[in-house]
Amino acid sequence: MNTALKVTAFATGLAAAFTAAYGVGRAVGPVPARAAQPHTAHAARGEDPAAAHGEEPAAAHGDHRVGGLQVADRGYALRLDRTVVPAGGPTELRFQVLAPDGRPLTAYRPAHEKELHLIVASRDLTDFQHLHPVRAADGTWTAPADLPAAGDYRVFADFTPAAETDPLTLGADLHAAGDYRPAALPQTGRTVTVDGYTLTLTGDLTPGRPGHLAFTVSRDGRPVTDLDPYLAAYGHLVVLRAGDLGYLHVHPDGEPGDGATAPGPEVDFTATAPSPGDYRLFLDFRHQGAVHTAAFTLTAAEAPAAEAPAAETHQH
């Protein structure tokens, strides 16, 4: 993935959270073929058993419970080979996913052409990397990474064990040694430029309610209508909540070759914010063989409460 776009950022999570979309949306052509299918656990039939335990409820559509805030969940655990690495140059990340029996997990259910998707983001959300590690027979994963600056990062492993049907997103902290100078959350507006492409975002994130997000891609003033499929889709969106780096990952509505989804210029997603606040949206897309990442900052504002009807008065 193209990591030159340092305006694409990532953050690290409390202990496991913003899973929903392999972020928070799904891309579509002019006519979506079907509703977005979140890449993390979501409520079935509109019910969310987590609500009874005080956890954040899953969104009803195009979203799921926040993931990546925990290093372990449902008996599975993410174990990094090392949690401190040098900053400012290439490094190799090594890790294992431990199964409930304590052994390294070696059987996965592939999703979007991969057994496991790895996201690395800086806690200040100014750096974002979507990596595709390689698994050895003993269950050890390796991936090259480049942490450009010292500071705190969050590593998200997005996967589905072969024995499970619901995906998991586990998160762990990673520290790049050096002189740390945290940056403010980037403010992007609705239009960003990356690698010569201009992307415009329409739509909003609304807490607890599905919303439509549309990204329009152009280059040199002309719409891009020949996007390449990337991991079985025309776009992938990862959304990270500022503060705790809660993780949502949702794939686009429709897919290449379904007869309804066009290869641009618009990539559409349906997304639900789990709470009010600021979010960083990272859109991966591929054109002419190269992957690019565009980053946006969007605020999910609480919808104004409906005005309560006036109470009836009764005279006695």
Image: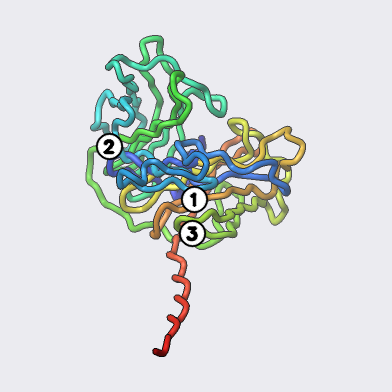
Dot 1 amino acid type: Ala
What is the CA distance from the residue labelled 3 to the residue labelled 2?
28 Å
Pinpoint residue 301: horizontal percent, then vertical percent: 44, 64
Q: Is residue 4 visible?
A: no
The kind of secondary structure element at disc 1 is strand
Question: Residue shown at 51%/35% (left/top)?
Answer: 1
Q: Nearer the viewer, mark 3 or mark 2?
A: 3
- Residue 173: mark: 2
**Disc 3 residue type?**
Thr
Q: Between residues 4 and 171, which one lies in front from this camera angle?
A: 171
Q: Circle 1 sits on which residue? A: 295
Determine which residue is flagged by label 3.
Answer: 206
Q: Earlier in the sequence, mark 1 or mark 3?
A: 3
Residue 229 at x, y = what percent? 65, 34
Q: Nearer the viewer, mark 2 or mark 1?
A: 2
Above or below, comparing residue 75 to residue 119 in the picture: above
- Return the disc, 3 or 2, that comes first in the chain's sequence: 2
Q: Residue at x 32, y 25 (%)?
A: 76
Spot the residue most to the top: 137
Q: Identify residue type, mark 2.
A: Asp
Q: Position of residue 57 (x, y in %)?
A: 40, 47
* Circle 2 Cα neighbour tier, 10 Å, few/some/many (<14 / 14–19 / ≥20): many
Q: Is residue 182 left or right of residue 310?
A: left
219 or 210: nearer the viewer:
210
